[in-house]
Amino acid sequence: MDPSVLGRVCVTFACLVSSLGFVTWRQSRALEAHRALDDVRLQVSVAQAERVELAREIQVLKSRARIVPEARTRLRMHTPDASEQVLLGVGGGS
């Protein structure tokens, strides 16, 4: 075999191997980026679920059905009778 042909074959083979190595490296980087993106998407969905759960808990804690019994037991409050209520009028002093 002629040395110039052998040199071309070696250079061609080296280019082929290096291009395959580059493709493999690029694909592995793409898979790593895809995994990172999946992790971020999972974190976002968990955070959204936690936000919805917290909003639901806030609604329950703010509800009258919860506040009235707590006020009666902890603060010893009661619903006022008619004699205990005072109505304030709005008007100019004259």
Image (cartoon, rainbow, N blue to C red):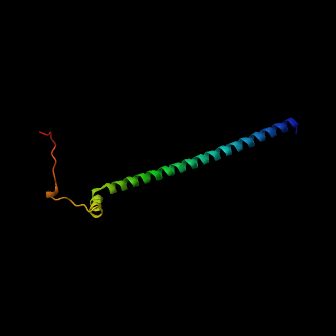
Quadrant location of the C terminus? top left
Q: Is residue 22 above or below residue 59?
A: above
Residue at x 74% of width, y 42% of height: 18
Residue at x 50% of width, y 51% of height: 43
The residue sitting at the left extreme is 94
Q: Which of 94 and 33 lies nearest the eye of the viewer?
A: 94
The residue sitting at the right extreme is 2
Residue at x 28% of width, y 64% of height: 73
The residue sitting at the top extreme is 4
Q: Which of 1 and 53 lies nearest the eye of the viewer?
A: 53
Image-quadrant location for residue 9: top right
81 relative to 66 in the view: left or right? left
In percent of width and height, residue 20 lies at 71, 43
37 relative to 91 in the view: left or right? right
In percent of width and height, residue 44 lies at 48, 49
Q: How many marks?
A: 0
In percent of width and height, residue 82 lies at 14, 57
The residue sitting at the bottom extreme is 73
Quadrant location of the N terminus? top right
In percent of width and height, residue 28 lies at 64, 47
87 relative to 32 in the view: left or right? left
Image-quadrant location for residue 29: top right
Residue at x 61% of width, y 45% of height: 30
Q: Which of 84 and 57 lies nearest the eye of the viewer?
A: 84
63 relative to 29 in the view: left or right? left
